[in-house]
Image: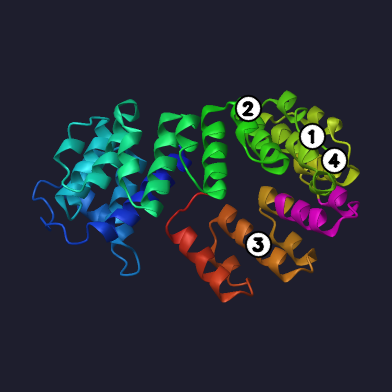
């Protein structure tokens, strides 16, 4: 299962745990194996972790319905089983109608009815429509969202998930359309889509969206030749440095933000924490330490991070094996 799918499922479950927190607690089934119980305790036993979220995550990650048996409510258990088995009959047993809808979305999205979302209050309606559009890969559902901001996010996500650049044209303005085209180009690994990105406005000239699109596609395709299509010399050097895995080309970059991003990428790829020391921006240096720490799965590198919040996140991500 794609990480993006998993994150949506986990995020939805987090919301629903609040909504259905008073559901009947059935406890842990006696049918759970010793091995499953040990893994749950090892990964979800920390008091700082929401246990049901963690268990659901393990079930999805392992595609193992046995983890679902350890969930604390019947609604969550059926939602998990529906997801793993891709069987909406489990969803029909769920008492909470919102959770039942999300269960169908993850189990058999073709059966989910967008009209259900229209019966919800505004915030829940937007979340429901966005998730429904994403799982059904249906941009028309996004158009039911009133908020321009939320509708744009929905359309962008559906365009990426369906790898359809035509949907990007539905976005409200040039900037969002261009960002969408870049994301779809990366997903499809198709540099020709980058050529559809307009560069006429001052904002786009500053953002260099087209050139960044070529860079990202070149990395996805592992094709260094695509770097040669980049017009901006700083971004071209950044692109080439990503393949050569040396900071020498990064040093030639004039734009400090791009230079620091270049250092971060090379440090992450080479797992060389010393490269981070050349970054003078504290924020970018912390980002570099965090990425290298994760690449090395080394919490000791997290201690170099100046921000307490970022340091704690770094350690937590490694402990919980969060993917970037």
Q: In this rendering, which labeled residue sits more in front, label 4 or label 1?
A: 1
- Residue for point 82% across, 55% down: 259
Q: Earlier in the sequence, mark 3 or mark 1?
A: 1
Q: In this rendering, which labeled residue sits more in front, label 3 or label 2?
A: 2
Instruction: Name the residue carrying label 4.
Output: 236
Please tell me whether residue 319 belongs to the stretch shown in magenta. Answer: no
Query: Do the numbered discs 2 and 4 sit on residues whose CB atoms are within 8 Å?
Result: no
Q: How far apart, in angstroms, are the residues tagged by discs 3 and 2?
A: 31 Å
Q: How far apart, in angstroms, are the residues tagged by discs 2 and 4?
A: 24 Å
- Residue 159: x and y, percent? 56, 32
Q: Which residues are magenta?
A: 247-265
- Residue for point 73% across, 62% down: 276
Q: Secondary structure at mark 4?
A: helix
Instruction: Name the residue carrying label 3.
Output: 287
Q: Quadrant of residue 92?
A: top left
Residue 165's tag is 2
- Residue for point 76% across, 43% down: 242
Instruction: Name the residue carrying label 1.
Output: 198
Considering the image in quadrants, where does the N terminus appear?
top left
Q: Earlier in the sequence, mark 2 or mark 4?
A: 2
Q: Earlier in the sequence, mark 1 or mark 2?
A: 2
Q: How far apart, in angstroms, are the residues tagged by discs 1 and 2?
A: 14 Å
Question: How busy is the neighbourhood of tag 2: few (under 14 within 10 Å), some, or many (20 plus)?
Answer: many
Q: Is residue 135 in sight in this rendering?
A: yes
- Residue 138: x and y, percent? 46, 29
């Amino acid at each position: 299962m794609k990480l993006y799918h998993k994150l949506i499922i986990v995020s939805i479950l987090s919301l629903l745990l609040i909504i259905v927190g008073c559901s009947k607690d059935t406890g842990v089934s006696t049918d759970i194996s010793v091995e499953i119980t040990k893994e749950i305790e090892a990964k979800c036993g920390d008091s700082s972790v929401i246990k049901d979220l963690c268990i659901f995550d393990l079930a999805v990650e392992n595609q193992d319905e046995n983890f679902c048996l350890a969930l604390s409510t019947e609604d969550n258990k059926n939602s998990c089983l529906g997801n793993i088995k891709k069987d909406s009959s489990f969803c029909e047993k769920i008492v909470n109608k919102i959770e039942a809808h999300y269960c169908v979305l993850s189990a058999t999205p073709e059966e989910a009815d967008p009209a259900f979302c229209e019966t919800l209050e505004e915030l829940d309606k937007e979340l429901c429509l966005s998730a429904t559009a994403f799982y059904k890969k249906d941009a028309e559902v996004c158009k039911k969202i009133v908020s321009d901001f939320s509708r744009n996010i929905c359309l962008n996500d559906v365009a990426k998930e369906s790898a359809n650049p035509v949907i990007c044209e539905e976005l409200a303005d040039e900037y969002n359309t261009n960002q969408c085209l870049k994301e779809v180009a990366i997903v499809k690994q198709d540099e020709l889509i980058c050529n559809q990105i307009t560069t006429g406005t001052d904002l786009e000239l500053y953002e260099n969206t087209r050139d960044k699109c070529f860079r990202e596609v070149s990395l996805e395709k592992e094709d260094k030749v695509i770097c040669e299509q980049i017009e901006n010399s700083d971004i071209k050097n950044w692109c080439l440095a990503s393949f050569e895995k040396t900071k020498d080309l990064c040093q030639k970059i004039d734009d400090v933000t791009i230079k620091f991003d270049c250092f971060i990428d090379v440090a992450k790829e080479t797992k060389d924490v010393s490269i981070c020391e050349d970054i003078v921006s504290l924020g970018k240096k912390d980002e570099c330490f965090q990425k290298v720490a994760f690449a090395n799965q080394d919490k000791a590198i997290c201690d170099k991070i100046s921000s307490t919040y970022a340091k704690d996140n770094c350690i937590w991500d490694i402990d919980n094996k969060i993917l970037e």
